[in-house]
């Protein structure tokens, strides 16, 4: 039986979810044994569920990244600066990395993928967008004949839950947010979710998968008023309007949409232009029943991908939570292991514009 030893950095909601899945299955996934050998946490004395093996806890994340008994490093600690150091340390040590960190990949994705290539190891990040919905896998493996012309998604479960409660129950934003927090759907500080930062990060990661230059988005650059075009053969993305959240919405706003037979949704979108520029929007839209995102309610996520041949394909599913995100993390581990044990441990990067002219 193949044996994969895991080094976990972080044991919060997602990290604990990974350990719960492994505990429930006795570590057995298909023909592989997945064993967490080291787990780095910030607070050793914090109470933890029974399926967290306390004897494997350490407060030294470097020891996990450099350990001989770790085959894959899983980064689920969140944040950017320390997480960036963690991933860089692991890659330089020749360790493949799986991360669920959308803020990290939005800010440093191109650098980290280049580092992975340089050191001949894999960097996987399916869990960084849309939780358990395998959108990165779909973008990397399915859309080869098609030239992608648009992405539109409901990619933040917190905002979608709040807007669903405001639509169905007439709740105020504050009351719907408090309910989401009580149910664990919103963080104590919900700023990243309700102000649109989280959705913006996820859209940047998806565009990077497609070989798009997202540096202007990282800087918050708006689309130039005239003469905007891609400087080279690689497509480049700009904000078509300032990023928007949902905190400003009132029950009256929601009711006006409802009376039109529509729903207010927080949507992240990207539209490809013929000149190689991609127009990005992150904000509130009023959706008609014919829109593929109209029926996405609660904490569900969805991504509508438009290709020039197939038309629009919509992927939906659970976008957040311990188990959906843990599922994506462990699927990435299994994808890496399938390649590694097949005798080909080459880096599997995004299907870039250089390899697929249809994406240019």
Image (tube, rainbow, N blue to C red):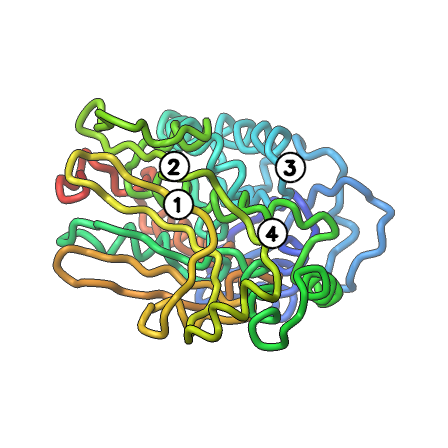
Foreground mark, 4 or 3, reads 4
Q: Which mark is residue 64?
A: 3
Q: Which residue is mark 2?
A: 239
Which image quarter: residue 169? bottom right
Left or right: residue 357 versus residue 282 is left
For the residue carrying disc 3, how many other residues have a C-alpha within 10 Å: few (<14), some (14-19), or many (20+)? many
N-term-proximal mark, 2 vs 3: 3
> Rounded to the nearest whole Å, what is the CA distance between mark 2 and mark 1?
6 Å
Foreground mark, 3 or 1, reads 1
**Residue at 58% in and 46% down:** 195
Give coordinates of residue 67: x percent, y percent.
Answer: 61, 35
Say which element carries label 4.
loop
Say which element carries label 1.
strand
Foreground mark, 4 or 2, reads 4
Q: Which mark is residue 27?
A: none
Residues 160 and 287: in front is 287
> Rounded to the nearest whole Å, what is the CA distance between mark 2 and mark 3?
39 Å
Callout 2 touching callout 3 (CB < 8 Å): no
Callout 2 touching callout 1 (CB < 8 Å): yes
Say which element carries label 2.
strand
> Rounded to the nearest whole Å, what is the CA distance between mark 4 and mark 3?
43 Å
């Amino acid at each position: 039986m193949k044996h994969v030893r895991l080094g976990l950095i972080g044991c919060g909601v997602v990290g604990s979810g990974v350990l719960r899945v492994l505990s429930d299955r006795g570590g057995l996934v298909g023909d592989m044994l997945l064993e967490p050998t080291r787990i780095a946490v910030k607070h050793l004395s914090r109470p933890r569920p029974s399926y967290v093996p306390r004897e494997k806890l350490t407060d030294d994340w470097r020891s996990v990244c450099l350990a001989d008994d770790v085959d894959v490093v899983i980064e689920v600690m969140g944040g950017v600066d320390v997480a960036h150091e963690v991933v860089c340390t692991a890659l330089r040590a020749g360790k493949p990395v799986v991360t669920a960190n959308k803020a990290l990949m939005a800010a440093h994705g191109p650098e980290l993928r280049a580092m992975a290539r340089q050191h001949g190891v894999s960097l996987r990040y399916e869990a960084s967008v849309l939780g358990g919905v395998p959108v990165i896998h779909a973008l990397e493996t399915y859309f080869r004949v098609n030239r992608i012309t648009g992405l539109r998604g409901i990619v933040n479960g917190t905002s979608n839950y709040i807007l669903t409660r405001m639509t169905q129950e007439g709740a105020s934003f504050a009351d719907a947010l408090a309910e989401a927090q009580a149910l664990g759907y919103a963080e104590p500080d919900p700023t990243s979710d309700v102000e649109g930062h989280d959705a913006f990060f996820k859209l940047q990661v998806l565009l990077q998968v497609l070989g798009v230059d997202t540096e202007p988005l990282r800087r918050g650059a708006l689309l130039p008023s005239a003469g905007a075009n891609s400087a080279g053969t690689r497509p480049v993305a700009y904000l078509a309007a300032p990023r928007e959240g949902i905190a400003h919405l009132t029950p009256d706003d929601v009711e006006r949409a409802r009376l039109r037979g529509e729903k207010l949704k927080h949507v992240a979108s990207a539209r490809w232009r013929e000149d190689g520029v991609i127009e990005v929007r992150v904000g509130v839209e009023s959706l008609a029943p014919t829109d593929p995102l109209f029926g996405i309610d609660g904490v569900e996520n969805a991504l509508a991908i438009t290709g020039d041949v197939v038309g629009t394909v919509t992927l939906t599913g659970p976008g957040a939570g311990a188990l959906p995100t843990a599922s994506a993390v462990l699927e990435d581990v299994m994808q890496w292991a399938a390649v590694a044990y097949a005798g080909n441990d080459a880096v599997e990067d995004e299907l870039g514009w250089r390899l697929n002219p249809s994406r240019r």
